[in-house]
Image (tube, grey):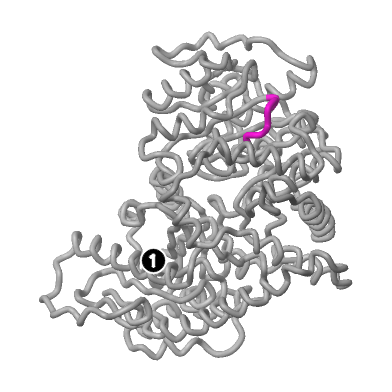
Amino acid sequence: MTWAVCQVHAARGLAAVSLRGTTTRVGARRGLSVRPAPQEPSMEYQDAVRTLNTLQTNAGYIEQAKRRKGDPQAQLEAMVLYLARSGLQVEDLDRLNIIHVTGTKGKGSTCAFTERILRSYGLKTGFFSSPHLVQVRERIRINGQPISPELFTKHFWCLYHRLKETKDGSCASMPAYFRFLTLMAFHVFLQEKVDLAVVEVGIGGAYDCTNIIRKPVVCGVTSLGIDHTSLLGDTVEKIAWQKGGIFKHGVPAFTVPQPDSPLAVLRERAQQISCPLYLCPPLEALEEGGPPLTLGLKGDHQRSNAALALQLARCWLQWQDHQGIGELTASRLSLPRQLPLAPVFQPTSHMRFGLRDTEWLGRNQVLRRGPLTWYLDGAHTASSVQACVRWFRQALRGRERPSHGREVRVLLFNATGDRDPAALLKLLQPCQFDYAVFCPNMTEVSSTDNADQQNFTVTLDQVLLRCLTHQQHWSRLAEEQACPAPWTPPSPEPEGPASLLLAPHRAHTHSTGSLVFSCISHALQWISQGRDPVFQPPGPPQDFLAHPVIGSGARVLREAAATHVLVTGSLHLVGGVLKLLEPSLSQ
């Protein structure tokens, strides 16, 4: 059966007031940058983040930019100017000894593996990644740890004031959100004197603002697929061209096995600028003659990421020893019509420890809480969702089954941007969920005290309507697999977003119940039914439980011997869930 939570419209009203109130307060704080920061450290950090959030491009402007598609090369040149206004030149970035990584899926995990391997050698590491899950300072890490609120606040205001002071009539005073954080990361890494910096590309590669890096030590390209089509192109070949844009003359680069056509694009891009590009041998080749490698990140797809990370780390270490390396000696293994294979070598003990000890929240992460088990994976492309499904089903096969009572499977899902939610949801159907729950990436409908979770790039109407669309996609997919109930006349077409959210979608009855909630907290409250020992929201259950069908689902969840919850579709959704399930991450 399928329904939407009838109280969404009421929550929407609360959230709309909250969002307007937040916008007003943030706007009022724009002038705070020229006044002394508050004395209370936590308030000082939150104030910095709120000011940072004013640099988020609003939803309307994003739509205009997509239609206009301005000159991306000019945008990259503007980033160089911002760097100069901040007090640095591109030559200064050479001192960071950068490992630059792009790709469609797995680039964050690959960076995490690489950073942890090199840290195990006693090196001081910097790590810039996106997005953040709980707090924005997670994006800039020193020795694997997010920089402290005090360090974030110090560097934020220094950079903010510097850019304010250097404004002239020919340029905007402030770069956009991600550009600002990229500049800030470079300043932090240089002032903290890291031995190396692992830098994850934001979107694409050729015109990503991180691509002002001119002399990385080594580059990596993870698995390619379809994502961000409105910005990168609608074919994997176009996307491969963008990703290959990080290649530099004479700088070694590595990639993992790819389909022939995008691999040919990468090879051509590398040849055009004389970039030595190598294909990573499978991890099995590096395990021969030694014990199997243990990975801290679960899922078979992580083996490809680990294989790339080993090559990137080894190449960096060779460069450090020799301050520059020539052509690598390719492996004797060969594949027809492919790139030369990178060397096969025995991983050192430091490499083994680094792979084993790698942690990367929100990717194939499991939290066991009494009768509830939460499976968190920020997969948001077709290939990564397929990998997520394999991991989830494998985890269920290896679980300890309860001696009596029913097991319940719940999907908590959201997808953002230009992704195809219908395609992603279809891939999730083999998991045989009892309930599918959809909600925006907002932790609370009326929370204004957590600047880290604010997002002004979309409107409230947009995110709520999108969740209802996800639910309708799920309903249609269920109809394709089950005999529909006798046809019932549809309700009259509502007018406007608020009216649309009033109407439960109940044209048919299905084996999987689907619900729409107005925020993550309400969704978790319904799913957990007070049975998670950590997530205990204040007050009685929400009044949406008065709905008879929703109430029956609540009884099933309360009485279940075990409840398995897969959270996927968006890293921002996973981050919001982690904020509620792991409060220590907000400290």
Residue at 54 percent across and 83 percent down: it is 17
Label 1 element class:
helix
- Front residue of 202/113: it is 202
In the picture shown, does residue 126 fall above or below 248?
below
Majority secondary structure in the magenta region: loop
- Front residue of 579/214: it is 214
Magenta stretch: residue 206 in it? no
| Residue 77, quarter of picture | top right
Residue at 79 percent across and 32 percent down: it is 92
Magenta stretch: residue 215 in it? yes
The C terminus lies in quadrant = bottom right
Q: Position of residue 19 (x, y in %)?
A: 56, 76
Q: Position of residue 113 (x, y in %)?
A: 64, 38
Residue at 80 percent across and 45 percent down: it is 188
Which residue does the numbered mark 1 point to in the structure image? 466
Q: Position of residue 128 (x, y in %)?
A: 69, 44
Q: Is residue 503 left or right of residue 373?
A: left
The N terminus lies in quadrant = bottom left
In the picture shown, does residue 184 fall above or below 133?
above
What segment carries the magenta color? 211-217
Q: Is residue 488 left or right of residue 512?
A: left
Q: Position of residue 328 (x, y in %)?
A: 63, 12
Kindly identify the amino acid type of the residue bearing the numbered disc 1: Arg
